[in-house]
Amino acid sequence: MHPKPKEKPARPFFSSGPCVKRPGYNLQALQEAPVGRSHRSSIGKARLKEAIEKTRAILGLPENYLLGIVPASDTGAFEMAMWNLLGERSVDVVYFEAFGKTWADDITKQLKLENVGLFEADYGFLPDLTRVNFDHDVVFTWNGTTSGVKVPNGDFIPADRKGLTLCDATSAVFAMEIPWEKIDVATFSWQKVLGGEAAHGMLILSPRAVKRIESYNPPWPLPKIFRLKKGDKIMAEVFEGSTINTPSLLCNEDYLDALKWAESIGGLRGLIKHSNNNLKVIEDFVAQHEWINFLAADPTIRSNTSVCLTIELGSNHLKQLVKLLEAEEAAFDIASYRDAPGGLRFWCGATVEKDDLEAVMPWLEWAYHQVKG
């Protein structure tokens, strides 16, 4: 007999995107947003530049790296990078989940590049990274949002590589240590690890990536929102707060609020600590129950943000479990990604509070026994 728990999470929001707002969030934090002003006004550009500079500081980006706000979330940022940079040399694509597969498909079916090496692994595993050729450009995700798998570190990337490394880091930044000297291009979105609002992407470029953009002209036409250079020079203004298209200053103010909160808990170190503590709550629960396991069995490649779990239930019972927890308002949006193996996915980034994860685990056990019968 498994009694129904009495205490519920104060914030039962475990979606992997958009992710939960920071603890203590209140719309009053947006009252200074310069709504109704042009994003090209002095105050509009200043607010956008502030978001860029605070991001740079928290992530610890090298001074000679560029960081800009671009359209269409992480997807837009990564597509922009691929369409501007790829085609100059052969490409190796590493993928182990849905979004990495999307980049592989775009490279082979949209850009139609011919000299492409594909290195793939099933959900829950990493490909053999030692086989990747870094004389080529290399495209990969740092963290598989849909698989709960991450690359353990940047040791597989040589410092003397000839090609560029293009990294989709949207569910890794602000939660994992990323060796920026090994990364030439990185992208992410506001609505992931810091729980910001949608539709804005961030693009990080190393000096090597800037040199490629300035020296290489892709053979395909580039839409206006993808163009990063004028003549043969990078559009420096994009990386100083003057965006290609119209951003939302309200969303930017929301992102600034998240960045200020991140500073208040110790910056990157504090964010990583929070996320790791959240993961440990689930690790402890899994260790005590035989009917639940991690999709990523190897703890060295297990994500501390998008935590994916398998449960000894059929697909219909899994759906019932998810609906039951939602109906009880104990956990929202915890079903696994539609293309991933059946199971659950809990977001464990720093904006999730450890107390809420501790509170939801008894509900998960109760719901399991309810639907199992």
Image (cartoon, rainbow, N blue to C red):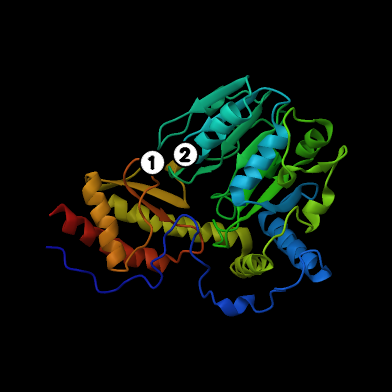
Against 56, residue 127 (above or below) is above
Residue receiving disc 2: 98
Residue receiving disc 1: 340
27 relative position to 70: left or right: left
52 relative position to 329: left or right: right
Q: Residues within 10 Å of mark 1 (few under 14, many from 20)?
A: some
89 relative position to 358: left or right: right
Provide residue 370's location: percent of width, then percent of height: 17, 59
Q: Earlier in the sequence, mark 1 or mark 2?
A: 2
Provide residue 175's location: percent of width, then percent of height: 55, 54
Q: What's the amino acid at mark 2?
A: Ala
Between 144 and 296, the one nearer to me in the picture: 144
Q: What's the amino acid at mark 1?
A: Ala
Identify the residue shown where x is 66% and y is 36%: 82
Q: Residues within 10 Å of mark 2 (few under 14, many from 20)?
A: some
Give the quadrant of the C terminus: bottom left
